[in-house]
Image: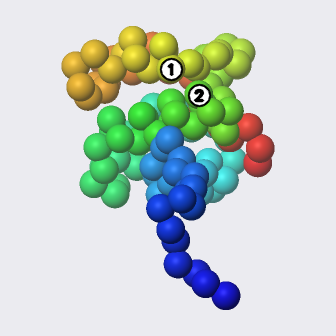
Amino acid sequence: MNDTLTLTDSIDIPAWDVALAGLARETFLAKGNGLKLLDFKKLATDYNIRLDDIMITMFQLAIHGEWRYLDKTGNSQPITQNTLDGLYVNRRLTELDLQDFDGAWQPVKV
């Protein structure tokens, strides 16, 4: 059996950071409910990761139907590429950019 990739082989590459997605999932499972911006800030501090990188991963997961965002009243809100593009104006997401996302993020499938 030949395990060598050729130029014609296709490899699916996720649109998000797999390690950060795994960290978010672990944190969700440990917490037992949706993750809030404060949870992501703590992860960023604890693991020395940019909050921007974590949140871009969360947006990509939501865009691709892996996670969902619930507003502070518990209603699911659609996240699209346009949502992210509208926030991602200054090359990095800041806390100010994210202030309206004061609800919770959770995986679609637990």
The amino acid at mark 1 is: Gln
Residue 15 at what x, y percent from top left? 50, 41
Residue 29 at what x, y percent from top left? 66, 53
Which residue appears at 42% of the width and 35% of the height?
55
Q: Is residue 73 left or right of residue 88?
A: right
Q: Which mark is residue 15?
A: none
Give the residue furthest to the bottom: 1
Residue 32 at what x, y percent from top left? 69, 47
Which residue appears at 54% of the width and 47% of the height?
14
Residue 12 at what x, y percent from top left? 57, 52
Look at the image and tell me whether residue 65 can be seen.
yes
Q: Which residue is mark 2?
A: 63
Q: CA distance from mark 2 to mark 1?
A: 6 Å
94 and 65: which is toward the camera: 65
Mark 2 secondary-structure assignment = helix
Q: Is residue 52 left or right of residue 37?
A: left
Which residue appears at 44% of the width and 20% of the height?
84
Look at the image and tell me whether residue 39 can be seen.
no
- Bin the neighbour count of mark 2 within 10 Å (Cα to Cα): few under 14, some 14-19, many 20 and up: many
Q: Which residue is mark 1?
A: 81
Whether label 2 touches label 1, CB < 8 Å: yes
3 and 30: which is toward the camera: 3
Which residue appears at 48% of the width and 15% of the height?
83
The quarter holding residue 34 reads top right
70 and 2: which is toward the camera: 2
Q: Earlier in the sequence, mark 2 or mark 1?
A: 2
